[in-house]
Image (cartoon, rainbow, N blue to C red):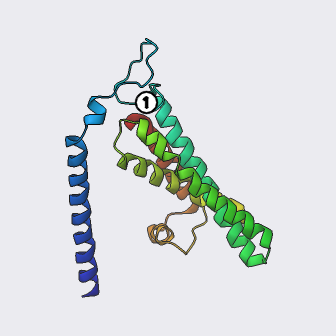
């Protein structure tokens, strides 16, 4: 019964969220006076070509956006994996410096994710694709960076998250997990350059 109620609650919240998202996007589409009437504030009679209003007046190539998305995703996820590894290792050994450095890297990882905002503003791609790239990069890079920081084998499967439970349930040998990560990483990079 609890599972049914939980499923019903999740479905209801998804319906409400999608309705709010639809209404907000409809509002933005109907109230686009700023976009339609955009003129550069300073006009020195330079030929500025733009399809969308860009805050700095520079048109960005979509391949530049793909590179920036990948750099932010990989850097933030590796920083978070190393930070979690240092934090957990520091808690096990009692080393307060490792705990502090781990927390600093975790905070830096969160700060890196805020760099998605200016990239998304210059992109013509829907923002949901950023989350797909983020999830693919996280599945590829987080566990190996965490394991190497703790001194564990690279493809060691933990026991603290749903992702670890799913990997344990799949009963893949360690070498197969490495191949799976490599294929997922290649697919994520290809997807990023195709979509952005």
Residue 160 vertical placement versus 46 (above, below)? below
Q: Measured from the top left, where is residue 144 in percent x and y?
A: 62, 57
Badge 1 element: helix
Label 1, on which residue?
Answer: 62
**Residue 71 location, quadrant:** top right
Q: Nearer the viewer, residue 101 or 7?
A: 101
Image quadrant occupied by the C terminus: top left
User: How many labels were placed on the picture?
Assistant: 1
Instruction: State the residue at coordinates (40%, 24%).
Output: 40
Instruction: State the residue at coordinates (61%, 65%).
Output: 156
**Residue 152 location, quadrant:** bottom right
| Mark 1 nearby-residue class (10 Å; few <14, some 14–19, many ≥20) | some
Q: Measured from the top left, where is residue 35 in percent x and y?
A: 30, 33
Image quadrant occupied by the N terminus: bottom left
Residue 111 seen in render: yes
Q: Measured from the top left, where is residue 96 in percent x and y?
A: 78, 73
Q: Nearer the viewer, residue 98 or 137?
A: 98
Residue 163 vertical placement versus 22 (above, below)? below
Q: Is residue 80 left or right of residue 185?
A: right
Q: Measured from the top left, where is residue 98 in percent x and y?
A: 76, 67
User: Furthest residue to the bottom?
Assistant: 1
Instruction: State the residue at coordinates (51%, 50%).
Output: 137
Q: Is residue 28 left or right of residue 174?
A: left
Instruction: State the residue at coordinates (54%, 75%).
Output: 160
Q: Nearer the viewer, residue 67 or 168?
A: 67
Q: Nearer the viewer, residue 32 or 22?
A: 32
Residue 152 seen in render: no
């Amino acid at each position: 019964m609890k599972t049914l109620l939980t499923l019903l609650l999740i479905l209801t919240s998804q319906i409400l969220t999608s309705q709010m998202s639809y209404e907000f996007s409809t509002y933005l589409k109907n109230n686009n006076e700023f976009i339609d009437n955009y003129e550069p504030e300073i006009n020195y009679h330079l030929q500025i070509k733009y399809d969308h209003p860009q805050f700095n007046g520079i048109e960005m190539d979509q391949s530049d956006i793909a590179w920036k998305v990948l750099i932010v995703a990989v850097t933030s996820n590796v920083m978070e994996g190393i930070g979690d590894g240092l934090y957990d290792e520091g808690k096990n050994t009692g080393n307060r410096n490792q705990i502090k450095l781990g927390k600093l890297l975790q905070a830096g990882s969160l700060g890196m994710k805020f760099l998605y905002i200016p990239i998304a503003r210059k992109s013509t791609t829907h923002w949901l694709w950023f989350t797909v790239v983020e999830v693919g990069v996280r599945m590829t890079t987080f566990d190996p960076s965490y394991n190497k920081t703790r001194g564990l084998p690279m493809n060691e499967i933990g026991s603290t998250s749903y992702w670890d439970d799913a990997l344990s349930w799949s009963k893949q040998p360690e070498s197969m997990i490495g191949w799976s990560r490599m294929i997922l990483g290649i697919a994520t990079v290809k997807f990023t350059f195709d979509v952005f």
